[in-house]
Image (cartoon, rainbow, N blue to C red):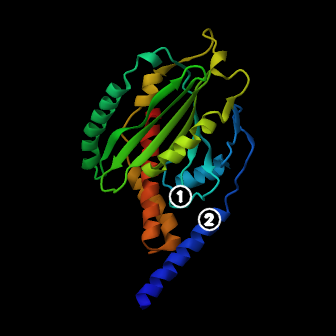
């Protein structure tokens, strides 16, 4: 009985600690002008915005991602906290890769591309196992790639299976093409959140507007750089996560666990989920390196 009371006390301590962290976040609504001057975010109905500093704190110190100075913020559902077991968010970054030509958009066989991505993941898993990391399987498209040629927006979603996990993970990607780069909105969540993500994808897609002179139609071939990437390249990316990622996860998660040591299975589930979020995000973002 004493052990049971001790477990309840530990869980209460964990909940109090998590509530105190959540209370420290400052959420914003309405129009957000990014400091880099690239454009404006109009926070969609049903969402809240966290600025770059807070987002990086969550991503790096709480979820275990490596340093990423490109993070501009996150939009999160307003009906749940960032530390809730069912939390998810669209992470906002900007990639100044140049003008992405979209001539290949109608010619891509996405089913064939998926098979190539699966094969690449299988081959790279051998290296992951040698390093002692769990394998990752691309199960399939959770939402098949679609390019809106009028709005210059590309989006797709992958279903990913982590070795040793019971449920699969959703990785939803949005790319808004611009004159000198691509605005990136990247969501990672449990697969059972797919209906909610899909329900909100339309307002999310229309939430960002490039600044005057920075939109796709403002491209000047005489002075602007053309990206090495095309539409197909944006979807394919690279599958292998950055070296040492899981070691970083273990390092950063210890900071959080010090305050809520042995807090019970609820916190352990939260930890496992966030390591998956960090891993998927870095698989997707490793194409930068």
Crowding at mark 2 (Cα within 10 Å: few <14, some 14-19, many 20+): few
Residue 115 vs residue 123, the one in the foreground: 115
Instruction: Give the Cα separation between the discs numbered 1 and 2.
Output: 10 Å
Q: Quadrant of residue 32?
A: top right
Q: Tell me if I can see residue 69 in this picture.
A: no
Asked if residue 169 is positioned above or below residue 2 in the image, the reply reads: above
Q: Are marks 1 and 2 in contact (CB under 8 Å)?
A: yes
Give the residue furthest to the bottom: 1
List the single residue furthest toward the top.
222
Residue beneath the point at 39% across and 53% down: 246
The local crowd at label 1, few if under 14, some if 14 to 19, many if 20 or more residues have their Cα within 10 Å, is many
Question: The residue tagged with tag 1: helix, strand or loop?
Answer: helix
For the residue pair 105 and 182, the one nearer the viewer reads as 105
Query: Is residue 94 visible to the viewer in this orientation of the structure?
Result: yes
Relative to 219, residue 83 above or below: below
Figure check: 126 above or below 178: below
Q: Quadrant of the N terminus?
A: bottom left
Q: Residue 231 location in percent, x, y? A: 47, 23
Above or below 232: residue 123:
below
Which residue is the site of mark 2? 21
Residue 123 in picture, x, y percent from top left: 25, 37
Q: Quadrant of the C terminus?
A: top left
Q: Earlier in the sequence, mark 1 or mark 2?
A: 2
Residue tagged by mark 1?
A: 62
Q: Tell me, for residue 77, which label it has, or none.
A: none
Left or right? Give the position of 123 relative to 190: left
Residue 212 lies, in percent from the top left, at 74, 23
> How far across and how far down the image is residue 235, in percent?
44, 29
Counting every numbered tag in the picture gives: 2
* Helix, strand or loop at mark 2: helix
The residue drawn where x is 34% and y is 27% is 111
């Amino acid at each position: 009985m004493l052990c049971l009371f001790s477990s309840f006390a530990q869980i209460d301590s964990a909940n109090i600690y998590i509530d105190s962290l959540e209370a420290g976040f400052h959420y914003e609504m309405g129009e957000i002008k990014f400091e880099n001057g690239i454009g404006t975010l109009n926070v969609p109905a049903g969402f809240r915005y966290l600025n770059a500093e807070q987002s990086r704190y969550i991503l790096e110190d709480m979820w275990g991602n490596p340093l990423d100075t490109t993070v501009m913020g996150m939009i999160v559902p307003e009906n749940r906290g960032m530390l809730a077991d069912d939390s998810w968010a669209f992470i906002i970054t900007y990639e100044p890769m140049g003008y992405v030509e979209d001539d290949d958009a109608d010619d891509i066989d996405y089913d064939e591309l998926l098979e190539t991505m699966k094969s690449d993941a299988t081959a790279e898993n051998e290296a992951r196992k040698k390093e002692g990391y769990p394998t990752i399987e691309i199960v399939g498209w959770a939402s098949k790639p679609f390019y809106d040629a009028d709005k210059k927006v590309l989006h797709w979603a992958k279903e990913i299976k982590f070795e040793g996990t019971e449920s699969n993970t959703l990785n939803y990607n949005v790319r808004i093409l611009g004159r000198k780069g691509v605005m990136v909105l990247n969501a990672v969540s449990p697969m059972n959140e797919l209906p909610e993500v899909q329900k909100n994808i339309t307002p999310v897609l229309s939430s960002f507007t490039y600044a005057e002179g920075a939109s796709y139609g403002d491209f000047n071939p005489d002075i602007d750089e053309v990206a090495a990437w095309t539409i197909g390249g944006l979807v394919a990316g690279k599958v292998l996560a950055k070296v040492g990622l899981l070691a970083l996860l273990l390092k950063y998660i210890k900071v959080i666990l010090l305050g809520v040591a042995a807090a019970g299975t609820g916190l352990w589930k939260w930890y496992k989920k966030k390591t998956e979020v960090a891993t998927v995000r870095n698989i997707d973002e490793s194409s930068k390196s």
